[in-house]
Image (cartoon, rainbow, N blue to C red):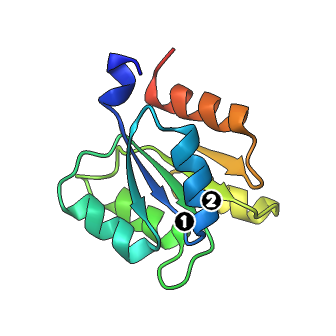
Amino acid sequence: MSDRSKDKTILIVDDAPENISILAELLNEYNIKVATNGEKALKIIASGTPISLILLDIIMPGINGFEVAAKLKEDPKTTAIPIVFVTGEKDVDSFVKGFELGAEDYIQKPFDPNVILYTVKSKLGLP
């Protein structure tokens, strides 16, 4: 674990436990926080825990990923947190909507470990 990566906290927001497990295992060199829905994600962020990056599922019960992103980008305290949508969605409208809401990138499900690792390092500014 590099000193730079252990200082980074990634919030994984997904309602599927298997997706959380895969992402947490792949990103084990970082501090990981987990939320299984949008409401829990917003509570974690509101608690003051510094979040370096959010991996955010789109389709979840209750507040979906788009709504979470919109709320975060409206708040001056959270607008700078990079968001990467993690989704099985493949339609162009979903991608466009995500980018319009301020997403930095998308990772497609099923996951490719190399894409996840590269994307996370890139968004965190790590080599």
Q: Nearer the viewer, mark 2 or mark 1?
A: 2
- Give SS at disc 1: loop
Labels 2 & 1 near each other (Cβ < 8 A): yes
Image spot of residue 73 (x, y percent): 38, 57
Looking at the rendered image, the quarter that the N terminus falls into is top left
Image spot of residue 60 (x, y percent): 57, 77
Q: Residue at x 63, y 63 (%)?
A: 18
- Relative side of 95 to 49, left or right: right
- Give SS at disc 2: helix
Q: Residue at x 25, y 53 (%)?
A: 76
From the viewer's side, name the closer residue of 30 and 99.
30
Residue occupied by mark 2: 19
Residue occupied by mark 1: 14
Kindly indicate the quadrant of the structure image that contains residue 50.
top left
Identify the residue at the far bottom of this view.
62
Kindly indicate the quadrant of the structure image that contains residue 120.
top right
Kindly indicate the quadrant of the structure image that contains residue 114.
top right
CA gap between label 2 and label 1 equals 7 Å
- Relative side of 20 to 116, left or right: left
From the viewer's side, name the closer residue of 72 and 10.
10
Image spot of residue 64 (x, y percent): 53, 75
First-in-chain label (2 vs 1): 1
Instruction: Give the answer, above or below, for where 86 lies relative to 64.
Output: above
| Residue 96 seen anywhere in this rendered image of the structure | yes
| Residue 104 seen anywhere in this rendered image of the structure | no
Image spot of residue 77 (x, y percent): 23, 52
Q: Residue at x 51, y 14 (%)?
A: 127
Identify the residue at the far top of this view.
127
- Mark 2 is on which residue type? Asn
